[in-house]
Image (spheres, rainbow, N blue to C red):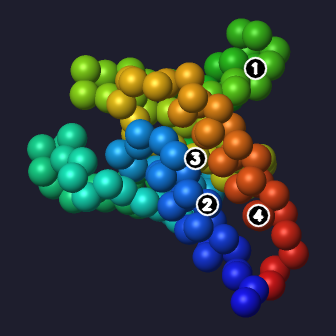
Amino acid sequence: MLLNKGEKLDELLINFGMVTNVHATAIVSRDGFVIASIMDNSFLGNGGNSFNEELIAGMAAEITMLGERTTEELLKANPQRIIIDSELGTIILVTAGKEAVIISVIDRENLGITLLHLQKLAHQTEKILHIRNQ
């Protein structure tokens, strides 16, 4: 059975969630639209309210753009990742090529291995998004 891009991305996120300690992960377009997402239903870090995925996707795209512009201006380079740390967890944004950004909410534990898995997820996502439409 052939999977379309959306199904392949969903499968990637499910597998990523199984090997890491993540609460929520989304693949969003550079325009700020949700492409695919998963969330641990027990994660209620926002006071028990459901998340506004569209708002989060838009903010992730904007934060990534600002991080890229700032890094380019100061270092003449592109950031590998953007990390936002808080007392309740860590938010990591990783680019997946020119088309997408991955945003993930994780515990601080096992940050190193999670970053490795995020880079792998970003690479796989970029490959899937570059496949001709099926």
| SS for dot 4 | helix
Upstream in sequence: badge 1 or badge 4: 1
Mark 3, residue position:
102
Residue 57 pos. (x, y %)? 47, 53
Other-residue count near label 4 (Cα within 10 Å), few / some / many at <14 / 14–19 / ≥20: some
Q: At 75% from the left edge and 86% from the top edge, which residue is drawn?
A: 2
Q: Which mark is residue 129?
A: 4
Q: Position of residue 23 (x, y in %)?
A: 35, 45
74 vs 91, nearest the viewer: 91
Q: Is residue 75 left or right of residue 121?
A: right
Residue 9 occupies quadrant: bottom right
Q: Is residue 9 visible?
A: yes
Q: Earlier in the sequence, mark 2 or mark 4?
A: 2
In contact (CB < 8 Å): disc 2 and disc 4 = no
Which of the two labelled residues, at mark 1 and mark 2, occupies the earlier sequence position? 2
Identify the element where label 2 is drawn: helix
> Which is nearer the N-term, disc 3 or disc 1?
1
Secondary structure under badge 1? helix
Q: Which residue is mark 1?
A: 72
Tell which circle, 4 or 3, labels the residue nearer the N-terminal end. 3
- In primary-sequence order, the first of circles 2 and 3 is 2
